[in-house]
Image (cartoon, coloured by chain):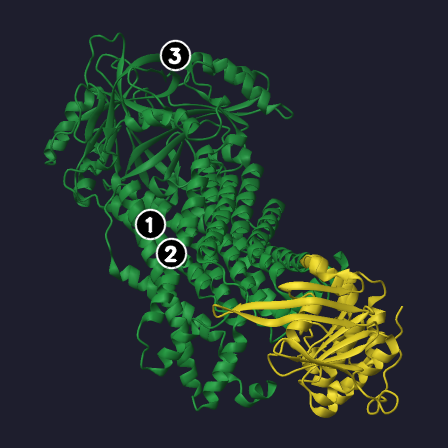
Amino acid sequence: MIELLHLTKRARTGGRELTILHPLDLFVPRGQFVAVMGPSGSGKSTLLGLLAGLDAPSGGEIRMNGENLTRMNEDQLARFRGRTIGFVFQSFQLIPTLTAQENVQVPLDIQGAPGAARRARELLRAVGLANRARHYPAQLSGGEQQRVAVARAFACRPPVLLADEPTGNLDSATGARILDLLTALHRDSGVTLVLVTHDEAVARAAQRIVHLKDGAIEADSAVARAAAPRPASRGRPARKMRRP
Amino acid sequence: MIRFVLAMTWREARASWRRLILFALCVAAGVGGLVAVQSFADTLEAAIRSEARTLLAADLALESGYPFTAGEQAAVTALAARGAQVVRSAEFLSMARAPSGQVLLVDARSVSAGYPLYGEVLLDPPGPLFRALTDDTVVVQSGLLYTLGLKPGDSIKLGRKTFRIAAELAREPDSPVMMTNVAPRVLMTEAGGEATGLITAMSRVRFALLVRLPAGADVKAEAAALKRAVSGGSARVVTYDQAQPAVSRFLSQLTRYLNLIGLISLLLGGIGIAGALRAFIAQRMDAIAVLKCLGATGGQIFAMYVAQAALLGVAGSLAGAALGTATQWILARLLADLLPVSVGFGVSALAVGKGLLLGTATTLWFALPPLWQVRGVAPARILRRAVEAAPPVAPWRRAGLWLAAAAGGGVLMGALAYLEVRALDVAVIFGVGLTATVLALLAAAQALLALLTRLPKPRSFALRQGLSGLYRPGNQSGPVMVALGLATFLLLAVVLIQKDLLRQVTLGSAPDQPTLYFIDIQPDQRDAFQEILKAHGVPPADILPVVRGRVYALNGRPVALDALPEGERKRILSYEFPFTYRATLQPGEQVLEGRFGIDPRVQGPQVSVADWWMNALGMKLGDTVTLDIEGVLLRATITSIRQVDWANRRANFSFVFMPGALEKAPQIFYAAVAVPEASARAALERALVAKLPNVTGIDVSVVLRLVQQVLDRIAVVIQFMAVFSVAVGLVILLGAIATTKYERLREAVLLKTLGATRWAVARVMAVEYGVLGGLSAAVGAVAAGGVSWGLVTRVFEGRWDFSAPVYAAGWALATAVIVATGLASSVDILMKKPLAVLREE
């Protein structure tokens, strides 16, 4: 679970102080899929960065899985991220000098986890890229790169997954497949998923949508579902990824 | 953690190996020079050691500037009684006279039967030495035959004796290095030597008793025993491992100082590494941020890049060790004339080890500052819309960092220099001087680059576009200019200094400067000598007495040479000094302290000493110095201190005794005369040799030729070392081009898409490399001019002049090489088809 208490962020740009996030409170229970929406400059990415401990808040507290991020130093944050958080970025952010499998393996290697190579191959198989393991990012299509990124995000079985516009750089069909993949993985692994997007259609895949505007929560609503969560329609269904 | 670091190091290195090879080449070129010098020095030392007995042609020898005393002879005879073989040798400079009347300075030597005790004498036509040599024949080096136009079978006169030339002397095991070029050897029997009448107590002869001990004898112990037996006299015991000490010392000094030039290349390599890694890391920022997002700590990422740098250092150093080992023969070839032995190829473990250690240490040292910043990379940069930019580094802080880095580099270089030359002052001067030079070059580079942006934009497209290339992101204009500037500086400074020094020694045309020295004038020949001068229209010369001796004690305390550490003090105290005596100062001398002349208040001998000697040994007016003159001790009080103008080419002396002290000491007489024309000199020499055959004339031009040869060699060797710096500079340039290849490619493609021809794109590139090269070379040329000016006017106290052609040629050559290298490495950019590049995006 994620708990934000009076979280604020101010930044100094061009000599004047700008409030990016007004005091903000948010509670995300374990296993929930939340979409954060809002126009450009509404503070979505800042919020995500703060959640990940990539940036320090100007005030307030962030608690995640019972730990207080605001009290941690750089290295403690890095280790915490390695243990707790998986990432998917809009521009994939694969390391260009590593093969697909090595990219997936990086977080496992950082943790010093045994059997990292085997687990990485398993994950690539789960996202349908078993035969692309030895390819470099430049040799993969955008969709394939993002699938590698998703596999990497799940490598350490993190309890929290943060996704920043994961479909933003992809065409709509490919984007939909990535969204299906994330949804399926969320369902199967029970991960808490926070997804930032400005795409209404993407947001509707979530269980809850938080609307941000000018650094404050404008609306916070559950997504009405006619039936069960949308099935993984197109593309190969993701294989089961159990949490430990 | 370690596994992660190693795995990532390997994967990163695998991906950017082309770039890493360039970095490694930086290290390799930096290390290569050092390894070449060290390998050469080690191979030379090994060669000298393995041929040591041949170099002395004996196990040990007793040497003296005077005929051996009965006691000295008895000590050696005692060795012979125990089975040792003994050979007598006497060497002296003399004038050889051809039947045509032409004369030549020769290095004569008489040897007794049994010579050589080790090694062999090679003759042409071949044959045993003592079959060719009778009491009426000599063997001579080819230089004599060539200069006097003689051939074996012809006759030649030395002193009173006419010899037949039996053969050409092709090799003599213990011949003095370099002398061949000044005075060729004439080898004769002892009786032959006696018959010349030139071997007397009143002439300058080096006597030696060469000893071959019976097999199994302890050379060190026997030498020590002999030393005790002859102590107190003027004779010196030399063992085979000390053979050719002057040459060995010269070569070891030379290689040590060559190592300093090697260190400059290493420093440039380090600067190249630092610059290249900074650009490399800048391109890696996103990947580093991703790794941080994925949970890697700053320490882990830092460790990963440090491991890469270490790998780079080791690989580069290995390549450098191979390069140095492979090129050492060039040094051996360049210095061949100065070497007592022939030096082949050898792999020196010490040299390779040293190269590895220095290369890796320097790489890490210079890699740390740029790598340190990876720890501070904010992971948030990965979120493209993150607002906050990193706070700019305050200018004073940036300047502080630069100074700290420079000071660090200076300290490292100073420490390495100290390890090479073991002289603190040299190390400090080197470290500080080098750091100051690099900072000055860097400042000049930055200032010139800044100035270019202020200038109005040129109208020409190629100029405008080319200049903008100097400031493209990831550019390394600063480090490239420092490295290329320093390389130009090294090469040009050597040429300039050599030119100025050579002019100095050849500028003997001032009418009153001596051009001929005559030695061994006997006291009863003074009048005859002046007569001959007069007959040739030369004004009467001062005939100076010269007494030779060593310093035995300072202020009554004996100098224990063996116990002194290596250094200037020991060197000065081990000299054999020439002394003279006279009552008046000569032109060019100036008394700094005391009074020149006999001080009636002082008891005993009085001496006037040159200031340099007083300063070097920390002596003061009123102190006493005890001199050992052929075993006789003479304690003199220093009653004046003189400054001497050594450049005036008069007969200058560090020690001038007041009359009354040295008149009875064994002495030779010596005169210097000024005869500017070479033909007049030859005529005078011929006349003197005909009438006074024992008098030896030494033509200054012959000595100058020797000086010139040595200077030439040293200059070439220094330039060889500087080539490594040039290589580093060019590798840095290549690295800088490779680092910005992507930007260059995009730029070139864009220009082509917009209608520029390949020729136009090439012009843009030529402008960029031309400006970079031209500025670097200009900065280097100015620095070279400054340093050569300082050295020539301040240290050598000579006249410096500005010769525009040398600077222009140096500048143009350096610029051309830089432009050519840059264009050559950009050919592929020119040739790429635009569409292929645009598609890749």
- Chain in yellow in the render: A
- Determine whether, in the image, residue B81 is placed left or right of residue B776: right
Label 3 to label 2: alpha-carbon separation: 50 Å
How far apart are labels 1 and 2 at the CA level?
Answer: 9 Å
Cα distance, mark 1 to mark 3? 43 Å
Residue under label 1? B787
Q: Is residue B822 visible?
A: yes
| Nearer-N-terminus badge (1/3) | 3
Task: Say which element carries label 2.
Answer: helix
Q: Amino acid at mark 2?
A: Phe
Label placed on residue B556: 3
Instruction: For the N terminus of chain A, give its image quadrant.
Output: bottom right
- Same chain, marks 1 and 3? yes
Q: For chain B, what colour was chosen?
A: green
Q: Are marks 1 and 3 in contact (CB under 8 Å)?
A: no
Q: Secondary structure at mark 1?
A: helix
Three-letter amino acid code at the position of disc 1 = Val
The one of B235 and B71 positioned closer to us in this rendering:
B235
Q: Earlier in the sequence, mark 3 or mark 2?
A: 2
Specify the subunit that label 2 lies on.
B
Residue B561 at what x, y percent from top left? Answer: 46, 22
The residue under label 2 is B489
x%, y% of residue A229?
85, 87
Q: Which residue is painted at 82% across and 92% down in the image? A: A234
As drawn, is B524 to the left or to the right of B63?
Answer: left
Q: Are marks 3 and 2 in contact (CB under 8 Å)?
A: no
Q: Is residue A133 above or below residue A6?
A: below
Q: Are marks 3 and 2 on the same chain?
A: yes
Q: Nearer the viewer, residue B703 or A80?
A: A80
* Residue for point 34% across, 54% down: B784
Q: Is residue B605 above or below residue B493?
A: above
- Which of the numbered marks, if any, corresponds to residue B226? none
